[in-house]
Amino acid sequence: KLSGDLKVPEDQVKSLLLVQKGQVFSRKLMTTTSELITRRLGNEGYTFANVNGVPQPHDDDHTVDITFAVDPGKRAYVNRINFRGNTKSEDEVLRREMRQMEGGWASTYLIDQSKTRLERLGFFKEVNVETPAVPGVDDQVDVNYSVEEQASGSITASVGFAQSAGLILGGSITQNNFLGTGNKVSIGLTRSEYQSRYNFGYVDPYWTADGVSLGYNAFYRTTDYDDLDVDVASYAVDSLGAGVSVGYPISETSRLTFGLTAQQDKIKTGQYTVDEIFDFVNREGDSYLNFKASAGWSESTLNKGVLATRGHSQSLTLETTTPGSDLSFFKLDYRGQLFQPLSENYTMRLHTELGYGDGYGSTDGLPFYENYYAGGFNSVRGFKDSTLGPRSTPSRGAAVTGNAGTLADPDQDPLPFGGNVLIQGGVEVLFPLPFVKDQRSLRTSVFWDVGNVFDSKCDKTTNANVGSTAQTACNDISLSNMASSVGVGVTWVTALGPLSFALAMPVKKPDDAETQVFQFSLGQTF
């Protein structure tokens, strides 16, 4: 039975009753029901509500009557919302995530929703909230959020040396909370004696007060073979481009994103350029100016922006060249992941990534430099980066193909060429690492990864000039051609960004795939 001033429709309260007539009496169910009713009243501003389950046993027939006595108290209003611990992030970055407003009645749901939004930012290791009563007032509370900042960016650096390329220097900086503003900035640079790569990205997630985001990006990649010590190369793509994107929130957990990019690509061939690339260049030329339009939908109910343990996220993106472009092609991509708690300390993660691209109109097939690749840390662990899937035909030289200036490849090793279809995913079980007290910045898992890339056409292409043919060593789209691996992984959020390690063993190894038992990554996580 229910007694007292319910303040909400009685049928809504009855739907929360976990104890039913005929059940075996459970004090735990009675207590949980009281908590659910208290929370429901709290959603309407009655944060001082008191709900007690009162059992009345009947010894004669061994039954118990339960009465839930409801005392809603006064409706409470929010006096002030305060933030503590945000030593790096500006107050405005936190305040704009609030769904509970000052002056409105205190809603348990909105207060908790605001806490979840702070956790999803990925800027904080921990977020806590308290709602103390305002001294001397019986219908007001303050809402106090306390946060503990964590590293929200990553720094990567690399130094290498190659006999043909000389000294190679590279580095990138990604800051998701630039100067505490909540804006994302990324800068990348790679330099060698013959190659330079630069990129810059900027995203303002609150370009407008209602959450419309605005992003810019620009990139430049160039290769100069005059500085290469040996006069051989497979191919190079010199690219210059810039783009802009706008995102619109359509609900509390999902948004639409639209983008435009202009990109100039120029293909450079070398003496050992594979036949598939020459076939493409002979058909389409070696320089292309393309304008790409993209539209995407994304959704996230994850409980945290970094090292989530509950909820799901998914995104669907379509990118296509527009009229006025030199090439006509499109790419459709889907990514999804689900975190399902198995117990207090164990969580199962399911994840998948699907991609498909093709040409249309006058363009036959997806341009080779837009191909998908599989294998590596963020793909199928246990295999070297990009070594799964179709392989190219080694250069057979001008005498065979008629491609002027080419020589027969003396090694005759097919190279990873990618494909226009990507299928990959996996299952992980996340668990705490023994003997480590603070698990907030650490994650361990056992995993099973599976995936590959395919060529949906998987047929011979013909050199239109001389009638030569190149046969890509491709896979028909079939689950039987999937690569798979099992292993254990560790992710640690450090001051330089997330540092991840994986120890993996291939279970099914396709032909030509290259294995790599130990892998690590700095600056990427899930």
Image (cartoon, rainbow, N blue to C red):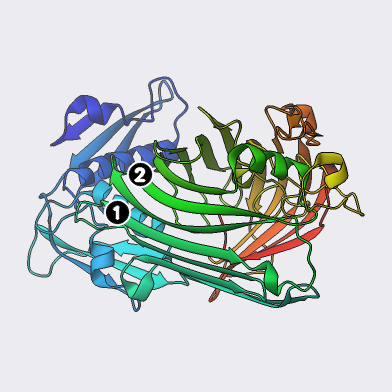
Is residue 454 something that shows in the picture? yes
Q: Is residue 262 above or below residue 82?
A: above
Q: Is residue 271 above or below residue 137?
A: above
Q: CA distance from mark 2 to mark 1?
A: 9 Å
- On screen, residue 101 versus residue 312, left or right, reads left
Specify the quadrant that holds the C terminus: bottom right
Say if mark 2 contacts mark 1, CB within 8 Å.
yes
| Horizontal and vertical percent position of residue 136 | 7, 69
For the residue labelled by badge 2, is the local secondary structure a helix, a strand or a loop? strand
| Horizontal and vertical percent position of residue 90 | 28, 73
Q: Which residue is mark 2?
A: 257
Q: Is residue 166 above or below residue 123?
A: below
Q: Which residue is mark 1?
A: 213
Quarter of the image holding residue 236? bottom right
| Horizontal and vertical percent position of residue 45 | 16, 48
Which residue is more in the foreground, 250 or 306? 250
Q: Which residue is depicted at the point 28% across and 66% down?
A: 93
Labels 2 and 1: the sequence-earlier one: 1
Q: Which residue is depicted at the point 38% across and 30% down?
A: 18
For the residue labelled by badge 1, is the local secondary structure a helix, a strand or a loop? strand
| Numbered badge on residue 521 | none
Quarter of the image holding residue 20? top left
Which residue is more in the foreground, 485 or 160? 160
Quarter of the image holding residue 523? bottom right
Inspect the image, locate mark 1, and give the three-letter code of the amino acid beneath it. Ser
Q: Residues within 10 Å of mark 1 (few under 14, many from 20)?
A: many
Q: Is residue 6 above or below residue 126?
A: above
Is residue 318 something that shows in the picture? no
| Horizontal and vertical percent position of residue 470 | 79, 36
